[in-house]
Image (cartoon, rainbow, N blue to C red):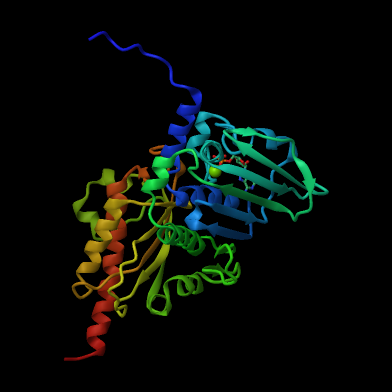
Amino acid sequence: MSAPKIKPLDPDVINKIAAGEIIVSPVNALKEMLENSIDAASKNIEILVKDGGTKLLQITDDGHGISKEDLSILCERFTTSKLKNFDDLSSIETYGFRGEALASISHIAKVSVITKTADDRCAWKTTYLQGKMTSDPIPTAGKDGTTISVQDLFYNVPSRLRTLKSSNEEFSKIVDVAGRYAIHSKNIGISVKKLGTSQCTLNIRNNLTTKDRIRSIFGHTVASNIFHIDFPTSNSITNPDDKETSNSDTDEKNLGLKSITGEFNSLNYVSKKAISPIFFINNRLITCDPLRRSLTQVYSGFLPKGNKHFIYLSLVIDPRNVDVNIHPTKREVRFLYQDEIIEKISLYLNGQLSKMDSSRSFATPS
Ligand code: ADP
Ligand code: MG
């Protein structure tokens, strides 16, 4: 058999493949747009969804908006207002950083934007397809902020459309991610509504406390049985019990931890309903399996078998120690001294739960 000829792929195909890696289902698009709205210093973010996000995914925010002259390159790949050189990657504080999200979305959906900055006298409206602005911005009425509408997601990737879950399941994933961001995003209001319904499925006003946010999203049982943790960490958390066993190198090691805050369920919490842990590192919603396993292990020593737990944990780590570049979806994060940090948190949780456990047994003598 003769060798098949090697030919370059059509750029359109390359773009579609790249986009499909970042946007696997509507919730990935939602997360990117939500992060953009948060980056834009919004106070209120409204999400509107039709058919699980495949027909319409629309986000309206009251953030700083986009300048009219930037609109022409908004959906081009690697255009960003957040990262200027490679070194910035290590200190980036905003959510997005590589200008791929909107570009990707525009290769697999029809995107339209209405935006107004505080300096603009009117809002500007335009549309995008395959990374390019399809018509000059036209003036329109609108408030300060940005509305981005994504229509017919995956219209040109029918195979992806077929592998999606039902509209209701895709919608639930959107509500779940929006809810997680709502718990973490103090002072920001976030709502989610299905197009054509009058009631919001999720509605978190911007003045709600973290506890009230948790109550609104996960219910009264969760919210009334949580305790707050907040331990400022100068350089590293030192556990007094560690001193003897660990060598001084480990003690001296700067773990790069800046703060650990969160809400954990107390031992009065009785629930069989699993809520996957809510982890944020440097304000990004992430998953971290080793951390999840370790904290689950701690709880299993205190809670009756089969009882679930609730964890919301926000870590702030020196950005130089966090590798956010690991995957385009940026969900799986790796960080330096991961094992040490997980152990410290687990020991701390263990200590807190032990205290509760012993006061509980004093309170109810057998
Ligand atoms: P990134 O977030 O990595 O920069 P995106 O493709 O998500 O890349 O967005 C590109 C740029 O578009 C952002 O850098 C930002 O300047 C602008 N942008 C996107 N969404 C918004 C928004 N809701 N409000 C203001 N600016 C936005
Ligand atoms: Mg972004």
Q: For the point 34% across and 66% down, which residue is it?
A: 275
15 up-or-down from 58: above or below:
above
Residue 296 point in image, percent of width and height: 25, 63
Q: How many circles with numbers are drawn on the protein?
A: 0
- Residue 146 appears in the picture as rendered: yes
Q: Which residue ends up furthest to the left in the rendered image?
A: 366
In the picture, the quarter occupied by the C terminus is: bottom left
- Residue 234 appears in the picture as rendered: no
245 left or right, relative to 166? left
Find residue 303 and report its image quarter. Answer: bottom left
Q: Which residue ends up furthest to the right in the rendered image?
A: 121
254 left or right, relative to 297? right
Comparing 130 with 174, the one in front is: 130
Residue 157 point in image, percent of width and height: 45, 39
Find residue 2 and report its image quarter. Answer: top left
Residue 153 point in image, percent of width and height: 51, 46
Q: For the point 22% across and 10% down, which residue is it?
A: 1
Comparing 316 with 251, the one in front is: 316
Q: For the point 34% across and 72% down, which residue is it?
A: 265
Comparing 131 with 272, the one in front is: 131
121 up-or-down from 363: above or below:
above
Q: For the point 25% across and 78% down, which residue is it?
A: 357
Q: Quadrant of ligand 2?
A: top right
Find residue 21 and report its image quarter. Answer: top left
255 left or right, relative to 361? right
